[in-house]
């Protein structure tokens, strides 16, 4: 890892002090800016497209510093957190210190002021070491922070963003016991009161709920309008009637908390309405489309981490029949195949992220990236156990944990069937005469 890697916040400040020409050096990718392609000037349009895996200086800095942080600080705690099924609060504090909880939040609100792809790179690097820590950062950044950045009023941005960037973990509460894939069949209700709104109902599967103090909650304000009654609210943990009722015991990402969250006459003031009444379903769709790229990055990071862990073992440590087991052609071909699939998944992830930043339609790309990367993560982490033999099967290193963790990629933020449905629907629209 680069010896110069340092915490994000410090590096962002250093970068900001440089003359702008430094930021436009040869390694800066044209598509890595958030400027829509349509706005590119004539000179830019003469620059040939560069490989999708190229990163800007900011993104490289993110990759290097997060990788260093993950190796030095998270890795020693991965097994312990998984066994305890608990996120170490010190890790959460350090994520804030590193600037990883406010990646896209502008610096004026205390965030790192980076671009979306930098966030994706960070999520991937974290997952290479621990997919649980990765999803904590992913949900907080891609769903919660983005919800306030996109739909919050100027006042709510001033109120919440500095907290979200520096000290308060966020959760995104859409799913319920009776509404998973059919998310907009949700039963949580909101009603208007003299001072604001009252929420009743319960949410299930809520990531980060043990660590969070800030919850984006979707409730139906007018069930007679069906999904067009769905409205988004901000609810703070200490609000009367709010409770966390059950922590799930899971197969994988066990250090990531997943709980049932209940609302019993929870009163929220008017200014905690997020955006407009009845627009919640649109916000949820938009946020999840972006969030899927984050989960796809989590899965490619996981696949790479599992592959590298096994490669280290078979090419350095384990000998059978008088040679390293990684020297057998039967092993080498499998490992080459797996690495090729990881690279293909990564290309889909980066392409979806770049398209989002370029202001292009990325919905199908995000669905393809999530679908494929979760398949690759499952395949590669499963093979990695076999490549390591018995050492892959025991609960010592990260091999068996990566395999267990990989399963969630095909479930949350839209199951694989739902991704296929999205891809097929968009293809059919395009190809119908
Ligand atoms: C660990 C974890 C963390 C989560 N975190 C969050 C969170 O932070 N916030 C949140 O709101 N939610 C969260 N979720 C919920 C998650 O998004 C849902 O679990 C997911 O959307 C699937 O819903 P479900 O579990 O009810 O499965 P179901 O919808 O019951 O699906 C069961 C099966 O039926 C298939 N199926 C359903 N509908 C169709 C269809 N139309 N066509 C074909 N097949 C179909 C599915 O693909 C799946 O195979 C989390 C879930 C887990 C397990």
Image (tube, grey):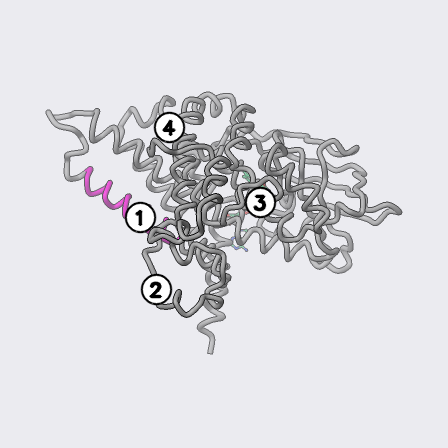
Label 2 vs label 3, nearer the camera: 2
Residue range of the region highlighted in magenta in the rendering? 331-349
Element at label 2 = loop
Horizontal arrangement in the rendering, residue 335 relative to residue 113 (left or right): left
Q: CA distance from mark 3 to mark 4?
A: 32 Å
Q: From the image, tell me which residue sits under label 4.
A: 398
Label of residue 105 in the image: 3
Left or right: where does residue 88 sit relative to residue 74?
A: right
Question: Quick check: can you spot residue 32?
Answer: yes
Q: What mark, if any, has residue 341 been given in the picture? A: 1
Q: Secondary structure at mark 1?
A: helix
Secondary structure type for disc 3? loop
Say if disc 4 is inside 8 Å of ligand 1.
no
Residue 47 is tagged as 2
Q: Is mark 3 within 8 Å of ligand 1?
A: no
* Foreground disc of the pair 2, 1: 2
């Amino acid at each position: 890892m680069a010896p110069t890697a340092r915490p994000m916040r410090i590096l962002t400040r250093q970068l900001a002090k440089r003359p702008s020409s430094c930021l436009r050096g040869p390694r800066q990718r044209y598509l890595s800016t958030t400027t829509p392609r349509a706005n590119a000037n004539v000179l830019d349009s003469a620059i040939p497209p560069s490989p999708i895996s190229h990163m800007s200086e900011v993104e490289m800095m993110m990759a290097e510093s997060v990788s260093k942080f993950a190796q030095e600080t998270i890795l020693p705690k991965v097994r312990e957190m998984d066994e305890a099924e608990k996120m170490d609060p010190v890790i959460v504090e350090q994520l804030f210190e590193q600037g990883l909880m406010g990646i896209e939040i502008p610096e004026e609100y205390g965030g790192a002021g980076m671009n979306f792809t930098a966030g994706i790179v960070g999520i991937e690097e974290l997952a290479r070491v621990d997919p649980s820590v990765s999803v904590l950062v992913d949900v907080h950044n891609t769903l919660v922070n983005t919800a306030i950045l996109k739909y919050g009023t100027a006042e709510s941005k001033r109120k919440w963003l500095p907290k979200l960037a520096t000290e308060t973990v966020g959760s995104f509460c859409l799913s319920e016991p009776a509404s998973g894939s059919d998310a907009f069949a949700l039963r949580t209700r909101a009603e208007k009161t003299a001072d604001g709104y009252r929420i009743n109902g319960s949410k299930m599967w809520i990531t980060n709920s043990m660590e969070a103090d800030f919850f984006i909650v979707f409730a139906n304000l007018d069930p007679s309008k069906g999904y067009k009654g769905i409205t988004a609210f901000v609810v703070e943990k200490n609000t009367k009637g709010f409770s966390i009722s059950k922590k799930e015991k899971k197969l994988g990402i066990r250090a990531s908390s997943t709980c049932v969250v209940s609302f019993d006459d929870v009163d929220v003031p008017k200014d905690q309405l997020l955006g407009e009444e009845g627009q919640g379903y649109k916000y949820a769709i938009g946020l999840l489309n972006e969030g899927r790229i984050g989960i796809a990055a989590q899965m490619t990071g996981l696949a790479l981490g599992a592959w590298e862990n096994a490669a280290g073992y078979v090419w350095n440590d384990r000998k059978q029949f008088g040679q390293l087991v990684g020297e057998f052609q039967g092993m080498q071909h499998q490992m080459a195949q797996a690495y090729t699939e990881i690279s293909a998944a990564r290309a889909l992830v980066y392409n979806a992220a770049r398209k989002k930043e370029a202001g292009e339609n990325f919905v199908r790309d995000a669905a393809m990236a999530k679908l494929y990367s979760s398949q690759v993560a499952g395949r590669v982490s499963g093979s990695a156990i076999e490549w390591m033999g018995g050492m892959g099967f025991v609960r010592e290193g990260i091999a068996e944990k990566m395999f267990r963790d990989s399963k969630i990629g095909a479930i949350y933020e839209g199951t694989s069937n739902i991704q296929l449905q999205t891809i097929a629907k968009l293809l059919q629209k395009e190809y119908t005469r």
